[in-house]
Image (spheres, rainbow, N blue to C red):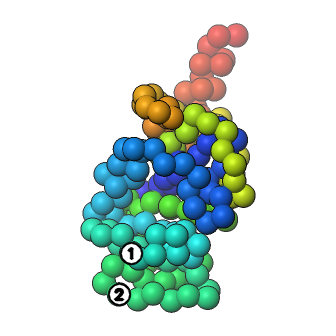
């Protein structure tokens, strides 16, 4: 299954000058839990921010200017090429940034794991807006802390979901 994972502020900021603009104890724990043992796809700038492939997962780097090839990382020239390297019927694959890759992947993802950070952040990199009507919010878990946040899971509506919605609309007329 193709998934997307991101932490985003109230004003849709995801980065500032190549860095995550907040430090929240425990917030990245979910990223590690979800992606460990799976494949992540990320753009060059996101990869450069981390500086190395993450342990216990396969990384596919999307880049036309940098190539990394080792047991934990391979490079693809595009999202489509990266997707040709995985079997979405057998594994969860997480698009993990940055902004341009999120925008390209948004119409394709089946599930989104979004951490909504409860602050207006200063930044220069933004998560693209998406139509929430295309998704069902399956989970919305508030987390307390110095800066509160919410773990939210969105699942793309299937044709069966849309049929139920139409049926419910017609049933209420």
Residue closer to the observer: 66 or 26: 26
- State the SS at label 1: loop
Quadrant in which the C terminus is drawn: top right
Residue on which the image places disc 2: 70
Residue closer to the observer: 5 or 20: 20
Residue at point 56%, 56% (across, down) = 20
Quadrant in which the N terminus is drawn: bottom left
Q: Is residue 25 left or right of residue 21?
A: left
In the image, residue 128 sits, relative to residue 58, either above or below, namely above
Q: Is residue 170 left or right of residue 52?
A: right
| Cβ atoms at labels 2 and 1 below 8 Å apart | yes
Residue 157 image offset from top left, x and y in percent: 55, 40
Residue 34 image offset from top left, x and y in percent: 35, 52
Residue at point 55%, 39% (across, down) = 117
Residue at point 48%, 83% (across, down) = 75
Quote the CA–CA distance across marks 2 and 1: 9 Å
In the image, residue 3 sits, relative to residue 43, either above or below, namely above
Residue on which the image places disc 1: 53
Residue 102 image offset from top left, x and y in percent: 61, 59
Residue 114 image offset from top left, x and y in percent: 51, 44
């Amino acid at each position: 299954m193709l998934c997307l994972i991101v932490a985003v502020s109230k004003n849709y900021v995801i980065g500032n000058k190549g860095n995550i603009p907040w430090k929240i104890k425990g917030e990245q724990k979910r990223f590690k839990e979800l992606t460990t043992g799976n494949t992540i796809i990320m753009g060059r700038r996101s990869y450069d921010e981390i500086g190395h492939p993450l342990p216990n997962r396969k990384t596919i780097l999307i880049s036309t200017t940098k190539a990394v090839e080792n047991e934990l990382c391979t490079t693809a020239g595009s999202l489509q090429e990266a997707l040709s390297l995985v079997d979405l019927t057998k594994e969860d694959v997480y698009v993990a940034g940055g902004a341009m890759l999120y925008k390209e992947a948004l119409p394709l993802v089946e599930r989104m794991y979004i951490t909504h950070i409860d602050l207006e952040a200063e930044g220069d990199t933004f998560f693209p807006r998406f139509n929430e009507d295309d998704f069902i919010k399956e989970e919305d878990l508030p987390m307390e802390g110095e800066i509160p946040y919410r773990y939210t899971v969105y699942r793309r509506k299937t044709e069966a979901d849309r049929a139920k919605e139409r049926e419910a609309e017609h049933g209420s007329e």
